[in-house]
Image: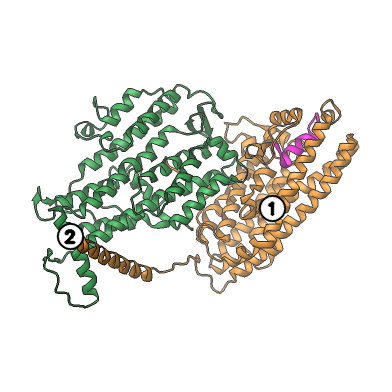
Chain colours: A green, B orange
Amino acid sequence: MKNKLTLAALLLAGVAFVSSCKKEDKTNVVTPDPILPYTVPVTYNFAEANYASSTARVKMAAELNTYLGTANNAVITLEKANNMFNNTNAPFTDATLNASGVSLAAKTADPTVFTGYFTEQVANSTKNTIAASKGVAGILTSGTTKRLVGGNGLEYNQAVAKGMMGALFFKEAVALLAAAQTADNKTKTNGTTQMQRLWDEAFGYLGVPKDYDTLKTYTSADLDRPLIWGGYLAERGKPINAGATIFKAFLKGRAAIAGNDYAVVKAQAKIIVDKWEQLDAAAALEYSTIPTRSTSVGNKATQMHALSEGFGFIYSLKYRPATSKLSATDYATLKSIFETNFYDLIDEANFTKLNQAQTILKTTYGLNY
Amino acid sequence: MKRKSWAGVIVMLFAAAVTIVACSKKSETKDNGPSVNGFDKAGMLVNYADNLIIPAYTSLQQKILLLETTTNTFLTTPNTTNQTALKAVFKDAYLQFEHVSVAQFGPAESVLLNNFLNTFPTEKAPINMNISNGTYNLASNSTIGQQGFPALDYLLFGTDAITRLTGANAANAKKYVQDVIARMKTLNAGVLDTWKNTYRATFVANTRSDASSPLALLVNQFAFEMDQLKGPRIGWPFGKQSAGVQYPENVEGYASGISVALAVENLTSLKAMFNGNGSGKGMSDYLVALNKTQLSTDVTKQFDVAINALNTVPDPLSTALSANKPQIEAAYKEVQILLTLIKTDVASATGVRITYQDTDGD
C-alpha cells in the first residue's frame, strides 16, 4: 500500500512536470487522486486538526527548561528532572501535561546525553554561590544576570534546552513531514487522514499559535505564545524570514493535502525543513559571534551564555536531514570547536576557532547578513 | 527497478525545475534605508573615512610613538620631573584615543582595539603578578584589563609608580611597560594599515543601512559610546548602579586624574563625527536630507549642552564624585538625554537597528 502510494506520488510529480511542458504522456496507467481546488488559509484553523501530543511536549520542554534554570538560585534534584523527562510522578505545574500520556523521553534521540546533562546541572546547582572560573563550576554574573556554568564554561540547562530543539523537535518534524508524503490520504479517522495527522503533528513541534503573527511581539502575557522553536523564529530568524516562510509553508502544505496536490505538499515540506535547519544554523552563527564582539569581550557571563546556546544549536545539527547542505566533516569541525573548553575559546587570540565556526555556518547556509 | 529510477529522474528534474523557478523569482531586496532626497551618502562615508577616521588613527599612531620615547626617558630615569613631563604626553595620546574609540568596527573590531587599549578599571593585581612572574601573553583576550592606556595610567602615575620602577622588580616592570606600549603601537598600526589598504574601499562603497553597513555601525557605535559615558565613564563610579556607593578608583584615567578631560574629548569627538566635522557631509546633514531637521538640530544642541555640563565638573573626577555631586548629576542627566536622542530617535530616523545590546530573552 505504502509503496503504491509512493509510486503514485512520484508519478504525479512526473505528470506535473511533464504537463507543465505541455506534452502528452499516455504511458501513465495509474490514475492518481485528482487534484481538487483548495484555498490556503492564513491561520492553522484546519477542521479537526489535532497536534496535542506535540504541543504537550513543547510545553513540557518549556517547564523542564525553567526548572533546570532555577539551579541559579536553588539546589535542584535529578529525580525531578528525570520525572519531567519521563513524565512520571506528575512533575508538571500544568496538570494537563501530567495526564497527556506523552513524554519528552519517548521522542528524544540520545536520551542519555540529556540525562547526563541533568546530572551535571544538578551537581552544579550545589555550587551556585561560588564564583566560576576555568575548571571551577559556579556562577558568572553580568549586572543582575546570573549564569551557572560548569568548569568548562557550559550552562548545562542551555545544552538541554537547545540540544533538545534538535534531538526532539526538529528531528521529529523532519521525520513526520517525510512520513506524511507517503501516508494514506483517503481514510479519515476522527475527521482527518493519516497524512493530515502527521503533518499536523509536525506543525505542533514548531510551537506557534494557530494564528501566528510574525509582526506581533509576543510577551508572557500572551497565554498562547510561541514557545521553544516558535520563539526562535523571531529571536534569531528575522534576517532569514524564518517565521513567515515556515508558517506559510505549513499552511500551504496542509491545504494542499486536502486537494491531493502532492507535488505542492512535497515542495512545502522541503521549504519547511530547509528553512528550519537554516534557522538552527542562524542561531548557532549568532551564538558563535556574540562572544567575539568587542561589546561582549570581558563579560564572561554573556560570552559563556552565548556559547552554551551555541553548543546546543550545533549539537542539534546532528539531527539534520539527509538532504542537509552541511557535510559530515564540517559538522565534526563545528562540534569539536564547541566541545573546546569555553574559557579557551574566548581567550584564544583572534578567536581563530570561533571565526572558523562562523565561516562554516555562513558559507554552508548562505547566512551573509 | 528501472521504472523506479526513471521516476526518480523525473522527480529530480521536477525539483530542479521548481528550484529554477524559485531562483528566478528571488528578488534582490537591497536595504538602502530611508529615501535620501539626493543626499550623497557615499560622499558622507568618504568624509568619515578620509577626514575623520583615518586621520584619527594616524594621529594616534604618532602620539603613541612620542609616548614611547618619552616613557623610555622616564624608565631610564624614574623621577618626578620626568614623570610630570610624561604625563602631558600621556594625556595627549589618551585624549587622541577618544577620537578612534567611536570607530570600533571593521578593522578595530576584528582586533578588539578598544578592549585592548582601554579596558578600565585596570587589573592591578594581575599586572603586578605579570611583572613579578616576568611571563605573560598580552595577545590573550583574558589580558585586556592588564594593558593599554589604563595599565599605563597605573604603572606610570599610580602612587607607587616610581617605587616599582626603582625597586627589586624594576627591570621586569620596565619591560612590562615597554611591552604594553609596543602592543598598543602594533595594534593601532595594524588597524590603520587595514583601513588604508582594504577597509576604506569597503566602507565607502556600502551605502546600505542594514546590520553590517557603515551607517549602522556608526549609529550603533555612537549609541554605545554614549552608553559608556553614562555607565563606566561617569555613572557607575558615581554610584548610579550601586545605590549611591561610589567607586572613585574605577574612573577612566584614575591615576593621572584626567577622567573629565577624557569624557569631554570623547563627547567632542562624537559631536565631530555626528556633524561630519561641519563639512556638510555628516550624519546631521543626512538627517536633514531625511526631513529630520529638528532632530538634527536637537542632537547638535544637546551635544553642546552635555559637553558644557561635563565641563563644569573639575578633574580629578575621583574626588569630584563626592565634592561636586550636583554638577555630576546635572551632566549625567544631559548625557542621558543625548543618549536617548541618538539611540532611539537617530537610529529610527536612519533606519538603523541598535544591535550591540543582545536581546536574548532566555
Amino acid under disc 1: Val
The answer to whether residue B275 is visible is: no
Q: Any mark on residue B100, and which? A: 1
Which residue is labeled 2 in the image?
Answer: A7
The answer to whether residue A17 is visible is: yes
| Label 2 – label 1 distance at C-alpha | 66 Å
Q: Is residue A11 left or right of residue B218?
A: left
Q: Quadrant of the N terminus of chain B?
A: bottom left
Where in the figure is residue B208, as x and y percent of width and height? Answer: 53, 65
Residue numbers of the magenta segment = B146-161
Task: Using the image, determine if residue B43 lies above or below residue A339.
Answer: below
**Quarter of the rendering containing residue A296:** top right
Amino acid under disc 2: Leu
Q: Is residue A6 left or right of residue A351?
A: left
Q: Please tell me which residue lies in front, A189 or A318.
A: A318
Q: Are marks 2 and 1 on the same chain?
A: no
